[in-house]
């Protein structure tokens, strides 16, 4: 686990003691595996994909894609709740023969090329335990895992059985963040000194997420937290990527619940600060923004970059106004998650670091450390309140 400190309400800096392992991490993460480090699919034609779970709201993006285009073939759906399957089947014209209430049986019968995991974060490990021994490549919705322990166990299975275990973030498909990284790598705007991330929205209930989605998203036993997990993971993955896989030397975090009537069991507003030897990253994750927010600011010695959703990017040189620019088109393989998944499992495109296991294992470490610190802070505050 990464080194952590806790700044309590009284302005004291406390070192977390028993129960936490403090170690000096390596400066760089391992290089992501290349296209030859997993067993490539030899199939052709549409991507034969199985869906594991339907309680994640993002499942509708896959269902819509499969309905409208012929590059994806849904070969099976595992969902414990038949009523939930029926609702989606009616909306997206799914054949009832695709439905299974037993995951192992579905995988054995339909033998998918890849699986999309649309369960609670807690169930990601269960899905990997079923898919990996069967050689089924996987794309899970962010973040990779419920905990760092789960992430490590999942990684061990993926490596043992030579499958791809990828993590999907909406921002991975933004041309804006790709151009920001290119500008830094080129030296045009470098070196990085500060990164600021703002991710989130008004809140899952406020934006109308389905009840089955909200149910586990606001359950700490299924999601691991609230906004700190749901949107803190975006900043964690982008910071790790922008810093070339470097682990932070320190993680500090705070969280609160601004709307306890809506989210009594989890945080809805969190800040995580990542300290690196040469830079600082500030992650602002919230279910209390006034609008949908997926922004990154990169401050370098030679200027700054602001990225918004999809193609929105602007540059600012020192003492000059910001200038909007048009990012270059992405490679075809990075068009969207389903195009990319088809290409990468067949060995036709490299493993992208933003989705890679190595990067997302660091994200799991960051989130675990942040949540441990928030929990410790809550304990200190609770003791202070009890002593009054």
Image (cartoon, helix red, strand yellow):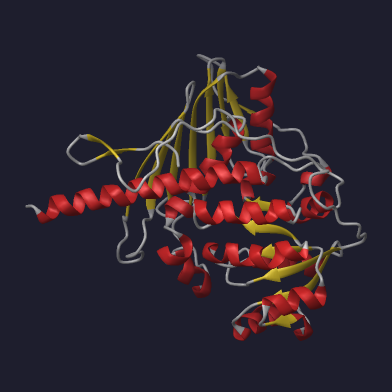
Q: Quadrant of residue 85?
A: bottom right
Question: Taking the image as drawn, is residue 199 in sight?
Answer: no
Residue occupying image coordinates x 70% and y 32%: 326
Residue occupying image coordinates x 38% and y 55%: 268
- As displayed, is residue 338 above or below residue 248? below
Specify whether 9 is left or right of 127: left
Q: Which image quarter is the N terminus in?
A: top left
The foreground one among 348 and 302 is 348
The foreground one among 312 and 51 is 51
Residue occupying image coordinates x 57% and y 36%: 240
Specify whether 375 is left or right of 173: left
Q: Position of residue 173 (x, y in %)?
A: 69, 46
The foreground one among 116 and 257 is 116
Q: Position of residue 21 (x, y in %)?
A: 40, 42
Specify whether 187 is left or right of 108: left
Q: Position of residue 352 (x, y in %)?
A: 72, 41
Question: Taking the image as drawn, is residue 123 in sight?
Answer: yes
| Figure disc tally | 0
Q: Position of residue 301 (x, y in %)?
A: 53, 15
- As displayed, is residue 115 above or below residue 359? below
Residue occupying image coordinates x 66% and y 84%: 86
Specify whether 177 is left or right of 380: right
Q: Quadrant of residue 362?
A: top right
Of all residues, the one furthest to the left in this rendering is 388
């Amino acid at each position: 686990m990464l080194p952590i400190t806790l700044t309590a309400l009284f302005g004291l800096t406390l070192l977390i003691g028993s129960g936490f392992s403090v170690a000096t991490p390596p400066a760089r993460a391992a290089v992501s595996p290349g296209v030859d480090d997993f067993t490539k699919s030899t199939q052709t034609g549409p991507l034969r994909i199985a869906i594991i779970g339907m309680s994640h709201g993002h499942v509708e993006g896959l269902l819509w894609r499969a309905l409208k285009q012929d590059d994806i073939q849904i070969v099976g759906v595992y969902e414990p709740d038949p009523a939930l399957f029926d609702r989606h089947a009616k909306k997206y014209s799914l054949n009832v023969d695709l439905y299974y209430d037993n995951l192992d049986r579905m995988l054995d019968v339909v033998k998918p090329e890849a699986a999309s995991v649309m369960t609670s974060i807690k169930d990601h490990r269960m899905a990997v335990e079923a898919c990996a021994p069967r050689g089924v490549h996987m794309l899970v919705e962010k973040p990779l895992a419920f905990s760092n322990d789960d992430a490590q166990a999942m990684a061990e299975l993926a490596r043992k059985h030579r499958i791809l275990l990828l993590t999907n973030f909406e921002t991975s498909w933004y041309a804006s963040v790709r151009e920001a990284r290119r500008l830094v790598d080129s030296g045009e705007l470098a070196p990085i000194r500060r990164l600021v991330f703002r991710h989130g929205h008004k809140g899952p209930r406020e934006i109308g997420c389905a009840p089955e989605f909200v149910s586990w998203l606001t359950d700490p036993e299924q999601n691991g937290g609230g906004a700190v997990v749901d949107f803190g993971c975006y900043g964690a993955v982008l910071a790790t990527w922008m810093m070339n896989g470097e682990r932070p030397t320190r993680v500090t975090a705070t969280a609160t619940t601004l709307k306890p009537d809506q989210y009594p069991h989890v945080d809805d507003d969190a800040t995580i600060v990542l300290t690196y030897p040469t830079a600082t990253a500030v992650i602002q994750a919230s279910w209390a923004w006034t609008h949908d927010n997926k922004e990154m600011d990169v401050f370098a010695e030679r200027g700054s970059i602001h990225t918004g959703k999809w193609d929105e990017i602007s540059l600012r040189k020192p003492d000059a106004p910001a200038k909007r620019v048009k990012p270059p088109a992405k490679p075809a393989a990075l068009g969207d998650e389903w195009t990319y998944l088809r290409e990468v499992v067949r060995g036709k495109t490299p493993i992208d670091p933003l989705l890679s296991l190595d990067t997302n294992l660091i994200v799991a470490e960051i989130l675990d450390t942040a949540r441990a610190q928030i929990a410790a802070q809550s304990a200190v505050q609770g003791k202070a309140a009890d002593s009054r």
